[in-house]
Every structure is written in structure tokens, then in C-alpha cells.
């Protein structure tokens, strides 16, 4: 009601919502980490559980850190991070042109947004300089995409949902190439599911990163963090 300018606007918005359009697409924005994030039709809607990924990344990013956000979607994670970390240098990437346009609106002049496949469009000068690398890559197994609510499977791009046979195809590509981009003692953070976390941990270990699993019961969120420091694999409850 607060978003509608006129009674006619409200009626039209209600009709779209009843027809199954995601609320965020009806409004044109989603609330995320206390921010209003623009979400255009056909763009992946940021989930509240991903706020846990942001909190973990912000805790690791020092002022003026170089941060890369892969599979950035609407740019919600990047926008939240630049609001939380002083002077950080943000580089965000997505393969979907609609998502890139949306991310550029949300991030604006506070960072750089590139269109392309994972690391491919990033400046080569970032190699070995990235302090925090974030990836909220798709992790739904292909056979389970059709089981998702219609709001996701009908109105969000499949490329933002489908993670391949076991859901980890894109994650593995992110993890395999990460060591070449991370700075010494840099960190890679990947959102995954509790069920898939052991496989994500295995991929981190194969790439020479020391993994640990962190979880939020409140948000039903699981993040795997990998670093070159000898921290040892461990699980934390949050």
C-alpha cells in the first residue's frame, strides 16, 4: 500500500501479485541488509539468508580491501558490503545482462560491475590482490529446479538457479580458479546448503584452500570459507 501512488496503482499491483509475480518484482525492490535493492523483472531476488554471507564477508574485509563478488545478480551483496566496509574496492560480475543492468543501478559509482562468465571479465591486474572473494553461485541441482516455488522457477532466470547435476558445477569452477586471484591470506566465501557443504569443503581442499563451515540457524544459511592460512577445518554454529 505504501508503494502505490494511487488506488489504481494499488489495484494493478495486487492483480500482479495474485497472478504469482514475486512481491519484489511487483514493488521493484527488495529489502536486504537494511537497504532497498532495486530488482527488475526477470532478475534473481536476493534472499534473506544471504545476509549471513554479507556479515561474514564484512567481518573479513578490512578498510580499503579489494573485494570481488561473482554471480552478483542484482548487486545486493556488493551494495551491502560497500555500505558496511569503509573504502573497499568492489568488483562485481554476472553473466546475465538484465542482472548486470540492475547491479549497476544498485552499486552505482561505489564499485565496478562487469558482464561475463565468472572471472573472465575481471581486470588482470586484480590477480593476487583480492582480499575477499564472494560467490553466491547457483546451487540447486538440475533435477530439483522444477520443485522450486513458481515465483522462482517461472520468474527468475534459470542461470541463477540451476547448479548442474549435483548443484555444484558453478561452485567448483569458482573454487578451482580462486587461488590465482586471492591475495596472501585472502578468503573465498561461498553460500551453499547444509546438505551440499561437505562437497563444497572437498572442492576447497582440492584447490589448496583451508575450509571451514559456518552456519546460521536463524537464517537457515550455510557458508563455506576458504583461506590459505593454516586455520584447520572446523564448523561453527551461529
Image (tube, rainbow, N blue to C red):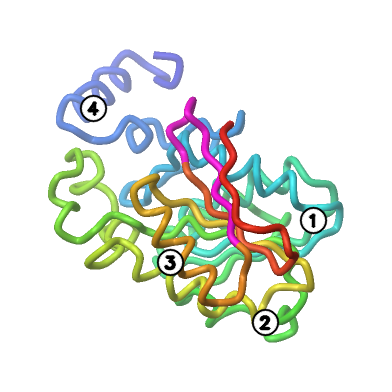
* Residue linked to disc 4: 17
Of the image marks 4 and 1, the number of the one nearer the N terminus: 4
Of the image marks 2 and 1, the number of the one nearer the N terminus: 1
Front-lying residue, 189 or 66? 189
The magenta stretch spans which residues?
211-221
Q: Is residue 29 visible?
A: no
Classify mark 3: helix, strand or loop. helix
Residue 106: x %, y % from top left: 58, 48
* Residue linked to disc 2: 123
**Residue 171 - label:** 3
Front-lying residue, 111 or 139? 139
**Residue 135 - label:** none
Is the residue 214 above or below the residue 118 in the image? above
Badge 3 crowding class, 10 Å Cα cut-off, few under 14, some 14 to 19, many 20 or more, is many
Of the image marks 4 and 3, the number of the one nearer the N terminus: 4
Determine the residue positioned at 13% across, 50% down: 146
Is the residue 184 above or below the residue 87 in the image? below
Residue 219: x %, y % from top left: 47, 30
Determine the residue positioned at 23% across, 27% down: 17
Work out how far the residue at label 4 is from the one at label 2, CA to CA, in angstroms: 41 Å
Q: Quadrant of the C terminus?
A: top right
Amino acid at each position: 500500500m505504501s508503494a502505490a501512488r494511487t488506488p489504481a496503482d494499488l489495484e494493478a499491483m495486487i492483480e500482479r501479485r495474485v497472478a504469482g509475480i514475486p512481491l519484489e518484482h511487483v514493488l521493484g525492490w527488495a529489502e536486504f541488509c537494511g537497504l532497498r535493492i532495486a530488482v527488475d523483472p526477470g532478475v534473481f531476488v536476493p534472499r534473506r539468508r544471504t545476509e549471513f554471507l554479507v556479515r561474514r564477508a564484512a567481518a573479513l574485509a578490512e578498510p580499503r580491501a579489494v573485494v570481488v563478488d561473482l554471480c552478483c545478480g542484482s548487486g545486493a551483496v556488493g551494495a551491502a558490503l560497500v555500505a558496511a566496509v569503509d573504502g573497499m574496492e568492489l568488483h562485481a560480475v554476472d553473466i546475465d545482462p538484465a542482472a548486470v543492468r540492475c547491479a549497476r543501478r544498485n552499486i552505482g559509482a561505489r564499485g565496478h560491475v562487469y558482464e561475463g562468465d565468472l572471472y573472465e571479465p575481471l581486470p588482470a591486474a586484480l590477480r593476487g590482490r583480492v582480499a575477499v572473494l564472494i560467490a553466491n553461485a547457483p546451487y540447486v541441482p538440475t533435477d530439483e529446479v522444477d520443485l522450486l516455488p513458481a515465483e522462482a522457477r517461472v520468474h527468475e532466470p534459470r542461470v541463477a538457479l540451476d547448479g548442474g547435476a549435483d548443484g555444484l558445477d558453478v561452485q567448483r569452477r569458482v573454487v578451482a580458479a580462486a587461488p590465482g586471484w586471492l591475495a596472501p591470506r585472502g578468503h573465498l566465501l561461498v553460500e551453499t546448503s547444509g546438505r551440499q557443504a561437505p562437497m563444497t569443503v572437498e572442492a576447497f581442499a582440492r584447490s589448496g584452500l583451508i575450509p571451514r563451515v559456518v552456519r546460521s540457524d536463524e537464517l537457515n544459511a550455510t557458508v563455506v570459507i576458504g583461506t590459505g592460512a593454516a586455520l584447520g577445518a572446523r564448523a561453527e554454529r551461529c
